[in-house]
Image (cartoon, rainbow, N blue to C red):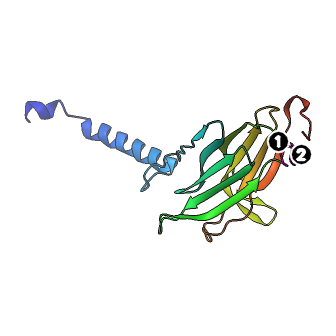
Amino acid sequence: MNGWMRGMTGVPAAGMAAAACLLVGVMIGGRLGESPRLPAVFAVTSQADDSFAVCTVPLDVGVEGFFMLDFETGDLSGGVLNPATSQFGALYKHNVLKDLGFKPGQVKNPKFLLVAGLADLRRAGNASLAQSVLYVTDSTTGTTVAYGIPWSMQQPQVAAPLVPLDIARPRGAAKAK
């Protein structure tokens, strides 16, 4: 026997035992034949100036919406780019002033925040919802309304009004202004 082979005695048995342990571990972990799945990553952005707030929000796997809040009118509008036409397909519009407690005609220089978040609600009444929500906050009172976004991968070009889900009024903020 060569010198290098003499030092290898017992290696085949040890190698077999290690391979058997590895195989059992893989089978118990349920990963045999599968590649490991990584968690989904979402990049949601928000930006605002004195007149508008904008944000992006994931609606479904590989689908993102863009929303804009006009401070002067209170209109929250948005859309989804159609991958086939590169144009906005599903369009959304909802006025947030009443939801936030503003009286008609009495809005003076309102300031808002607009952010998006993940929520696996999927249904509100008869509407199918996206996996995300929009939060609109009145910067003066802190009153915040959460909106569900109607969405169906089967009908991606159809849009319905945004769905007010709930209102948070910190520090006992009044309902009307």
Residue 8: x and y in percent read 19, 33
Quickly name the residue at label 2: 103
Residue 89: x and y in percent read 58, 66
Q: What residue type is labelled 2?
A: Lys
**Residue 33, placed above or below residue 177:** below
Residue 166: x and y in percent read 83, 47
Q: Quadrant of residue 10?
A: top left
Residue 172: x and y in percent read 91, 31
Taking the image as shown, residue 19 lies to the left or right of residue 9, namely right
Q: Do the residues labelled 2 and 1 touch (CB within 8 Å)?
A: yes
Q: At numbered mark 1, what does the secondary structure look like: helix, strand or loop?
A: loop
Q: 10 Å neighbourhood of mark 1: few (<14), some, or many (≥20)?
A: some
Which residue is at a point 89% across and 45% down the rendered structure image? Answer: 103
**Residue 93, placed above or below residue 167:** below
Can residue 12 be seen here? The reply is yes
Magenta-span inclusion, residue 104? yes
**Residue 50, placed above or below residue 152:** above
Can residue 150 be seen here? The reply is no
Magenta-span inclusion, residue 170? no
Q: Nearer the viewer, residue 109 or 162?
A: 109
Which residue is at a point 67% across and 54% down the rendered structure image? Answer: 77
Q: Distance between the residues labelled 2 and 1?
A: 7 Å
Taking the image as shown, residue 71 lies to the left or right of residue 99, namely left
Q: Which amino acid does label 1 sit on?
A: Val
Q: Main secondary structure of the magenta part?
A: loop
Span highlighted in magenta in the image = 98-107
Quickly name the residue at label 1: 107
Which residue is at a point 41% across and 42% down the rendered structure image? Answer: 21
Task: Specify the quadrant that holds the C terminus.
Answer: top right
Which residue is at a point 21% across and 34% down the rendered structure image? Answer: 9
Q: In which quarter of the image is residue 12?
A: top left
